[in-house]
Amino acid sequence: MSKKKIQAIRGMNDLLPEQSPLWQYFEGKMRSLLARYGYAEIRTPIVEQTALFKRSIGEVTDIVEKEMYTFEDRNGDSLTLRPEGTASCVRAAMEHGLLHNQTQRLWYQGPMFRHERPQKGRYRQFHQVGVEAFGLEGPDIDAEVILLSARLWRELGLMEHVTLELNSLGSSEARAAYRDTLVAYFEQHHDQLDEDSRRRMSSNPLRILDSKNPEMAPMLAEAPKLIDHLDDESREHFETLCAMLDAAGIAYVINPRLVRGLDYYGRTVFEWTTTALGSQGTVCAGGRYDGLVEQLGGKPTPAVGFAMGIERLILLLETLALVPDAARSQLDLYILPMDDAATASALLLCERLRDELPGLRAQLHCGGGSFKSRIKKADKSGARLALLLGEDELTHSTATLKFMREDREQQTLTQNALGEALVELLGHRDN
Ligand code: ATP
Ligand code: MG
């Protein structure tokens, strides 16, 4: 009987060595940016009690209704693989007293899990990096998180390929009043609602606006707009935010149908979208969720944040050919003992060079082989330079630098002069 190979779970991807430099490039940019804005990292478990997500994201949402990985553990407790990061972040911040009489600017990163139909830009395990700011109620912090994301687009060369969509969902009172207006409108157009939407008429009519069903689009375009029914405070908050973005030179479009797929949002909501990825066009989404902490049993705490889908951003960088050389796997130097007698010396020389040049990316040839196969491996490594050590070199304490990618004469140098020569050739890097 042949044994069937076990494969990865559908919609859950391996990140292969060829791809990881690009992820590290993106993650490095993001990490440095967050540090420059004074955000601190928080890490939470990937499994939480199911009730956390039901209570925060909302029972009548796509995520809770059909996308969660929920299971019973051995004690019979209902647990869920986190579908997003905000709920866990709020839970942890409350649990550890981070929200008591203080403000917090936090960020997180990691895998999220949703049982969706896998396709390009949509997976069952995907990764998000997100920020959450707690304890600040003014539009200044809304503007800050948007400016932070805008700076990331500039640093990645993406600014001209993304659009900021903005809306306000008002206060919960304004939403409740608007809800009646909206339901009355949908009742008039009942025949045009799909099954999902009819079900949501009584439970969550605002969510109908978020429908991706193209047949409903014309009817939805004519629906009354929440932004025309805002309470005064929310209107002022929104207008001030818009003025701050104008002053910072950030372009946006107001999209009155932007409601977001999670229940905890109020007032400001926004999405950064792109047309370069087909229908999976949202790369970053967020907004204000002033009611969530209280909803989860804490004191009323204003909050705002966003989450970015890393897979989509990586796809976008690749699609637009915006992957810099630094984000490709690259070795500077392949250190090659020409025969087994040179192995031990090559190992030591390699260590010495690593001491001398902390940024050097060097690989030592291991595993022996004929001279021909060694040279082949040096070539295959992709390194720009090879450093050859043979009998002659050992006798004279020298090493021979061979240029693997350029038409250039090889050079034999004393081992003491190698450090300086490499700095010259490779440029200074101190990472
Ligand atoms: P969508 O409308 O595309 O389903 P969403 O509103 O469900 O997105 P959020 O919960 O706001 O998405 O998540 C924020 C970001 O995370 C999205 O904008 C997207 O970039 C990414 N994302 C969400 N779901 C997935 C997924 N299944 N696979 C890959 N990325 C995802
Ligand atoms: Mg979704």
Image (cartoon, rainbow, N blue to C red):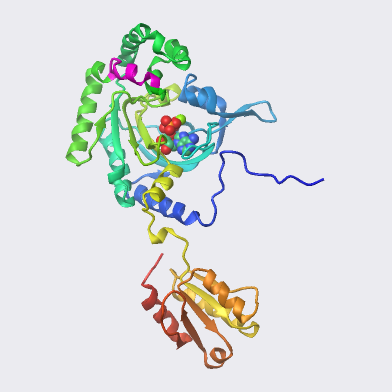
**Residue sitting at x 32%, y 19%:** 218
Q: Main secondary structure of the magenta part?
A: helix
Location of residue 248 in the rendering, given as x and y in whole percent from the top left corner: 20, 41
Q: The C terminus appears in which quarter of the rendering?
A: bottom left
Q: The N terminus appears in which quarter of the rendering?
A: top right
Query: Position of 213 compared to 143: left or right?
Result: right
Q: Is residue 29 visible?
A: yes
Magenta span covers which residues? 215-226
Report the front residue among 306 and 302: 306
Query: Position of 428 compared to 62: left or right?
Result: left
Query: Position of 324 compared to 143: left or right?
Result: right
**Residue sitting at x 47%, y 22%:** 61
As drawn, the residue found furthest toward the front would be: 215
Q: How many marks?
A: 0
**Residue sitting at x 34%, y 51%:** 156
Residue 218, compared with residue 147, is above or below; it is above
Residue 357, compared with residue 31, is above or below; it is below
As drawn, the residue found furthest toward the right would be: 1
Whether residue 217 appears in magenta in the rendering, the answer is yes
**Residue sitting at x 54%, y 89%:** 393
Residue 310, compared with residue 375, is above or below; it is above
Whether residue 80 appears in magenta in the rendering, the answer is no
Location of residue 136 in the rendering, given as x and y in whole percent from the top left corner: 31, 32
Q: Is residue 133 visible?
A: no
Location of residue 190 in the rendering, given as x and y in whole percent from the top left corner: 40, 8
Report the front residue among 57 and 94: 57
Location of residue 57 in the rendering, given as x and y in whole percent from the top left corner: 46, 25
